[in-house]
Image (tube, helix red, strand yellow):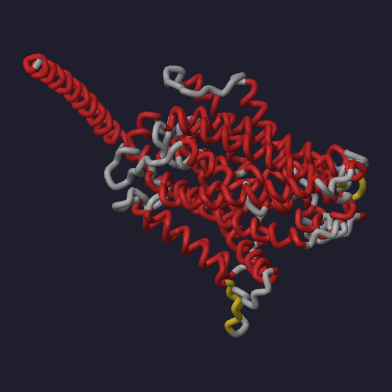
Amino acid sequence: MQIFRTKSVEQTLAETEEEGHSLKRNLGWWDLAVMGVAVAVGAGIFSVGAQAAAFHAGPAVIISFIIAGIVCGAAVMCYAEFASVMPVAGSAYTFTYATLGEIFAWIIGWDLILEMLMAGSVISKFWGVYLNDFLRLMGVNFNTNIMIGSFHLDIAPIVIVAFFTTLLVLGTKIGARVDGAMTVLKIAVVLFVVIVGFFYVKASNYTPFIPPAEPSADVANATTVHGTLGQPLFQWLTHMSPTIYGVPGIISGAALVFFAFIGFDVVATASEETRNPKRNVPLGIGVGMALIIVMYVLVAIVTTGMVSYKQLASVESPSLATAFELVGADWAAKIISFGICLGLATVVMVLLLGLTRVVFAMSRDGLLPRALSTTGKHGTPARLQIVVGVVVAVIAACFNIDVLSDMVNIGTLSAFTLVALAIPIMRKRRPDLKRSFRMPGNPWIPLLVALANFYLMLNLTVLTWVRFLIWLVVGFIIYFAYGYKHARVGTGELDDEVVKYEKQRQLKAQRAKQAGSVGLGNDASVTKVEAGKD
């Protein structure tokens, strides 16, 4: 069937040289590592761990973070292998197109758009909320929310999205430098808060480390969606009564805190803008992943050690700030609020970049209108970046989108699952490709990684799965109405691009060889002249 047609590695690489549709390479491995830390260390480090401890795993949330980190780290190694072979924009979408076929690539691309659009909008919205909290704590009488008649408008998301959209239009490197500076500062805030928090830790709060399972209905704030829709899908399928804590709580906690590790599929979308990508992409992803696992585990240890998980569960939306308030350290709320504002700001930038690059890749392939993938004088898809910025800002400023945040997790996990499955397929189809990084344990470890990601998906709520399926149906309608007919793999246009690409590569090799010969000749002439002078 034509919906399973694949795009070859040669066709994929040829697209990166297409005039007017190529990106500028100016990022190093440290830029990618910082980018991963920037998107993963946001408000989540201050809130997700506390919520997972309160309503899922208790002190064993530490294990939840380790499980999520291992699963994500293994998936990241799959990304690293693909990025070393195909350093191209699009991340999981591009990798899937070359292995599993067009229909699966469309599904993943559509999932990534959902993930990053919702994440960008939610984070922009929350940035405004925490900005207002910070201003209130500092005694500044100002609020970013405006009422126009009965219409509510929050201008804060518009401001932060406009700022980073402008930076990204001017160049990815400029945005990465600003993002890097802010990321270093917020990491310093996190470390400061963790160090201070250790002085309030009590060993008794870690007992019991794995609390006995109990019905979720017995904990008032355990879920905002009650009944079947608020139950993890796995519990619903196996007819288990809804519970929290215990071993199932550790797993559902891992599914929740997986949100903390979503940054790396975004990092892979920047492969096409990275210098020496076969070395720098795996290195940048690995360093960033290690930093994040360490920071999240430290925060989990501090949060659950400062106060009992039962105390956290008595609060509707517990966070690291809640723990400090419960031990009487209200002063820390100001520092944490400042750290959250910094953290959310950097996340917004990376999500805007990632969303734009996924749409860019799908557009360049013809699955979405080709005009969206046109690049400007700065080597960035300026028009697309502006369109994406406007959409994210409007959604964040005008709509209440808190309930859609779980969609971020299911979009990421589905992408990770298919990328892991694609590793053994690509190894078998193209053993000739040079890989500067190889995922160890093929095919069994990639298959285990795929199963682990899918199992975490099953521990998300039934409501999340319902929304996810509706999004997929809408995506299939768009694909069969437009994408399938206009895909460049089917029209044969990419074959022409491969011919051009090969000619350009041969021409560059000849010029380099000629330049080397001329250089040697000049060196010889200089030597003779200098010898004459002597």
Q: Is residue 465 visible?
A: no
Residue at (82, 47) in percent of width and height: 199
Say above or below: 441 vs 375: above
**Quarter of the image where one finds residue 441:** top right
Say above or below: 115 vs 501: below
Q: Nearer the viewer, residue 335 or 69?
A: 335
Say above or below: 500 vs 472: above
**Quarter of the image where one finds residue 245:** top right
Q: Quadrant of the C terminus?
A: top left
Residue at (86, 55) in percent of width and height: 313
Residue 240 x, y percent position in the rendering: 87, 43
Name the side, left or right, on which 497 lies relative to 158: left
Name the side, left or right, on which 327 lies relative to 367: right
Residue at (33, 34) in percent of width and height: 14
Q: Nearer the viewer, residue 236 or 51?
A: 51
Residue 167 x, y percent position in the rendering: 42, 56
Residue 178 x, y percent position in the rendering: 48, 52
Q: Nearer the viewer, residue 162 or 212?
A: 162
Name the side, left or right, on which 492 lies relative to 434: left
Name the side, left or right, on which 323 lies relative to 127: right
Residue 448 x, y percent position in the rendering: 67, 27
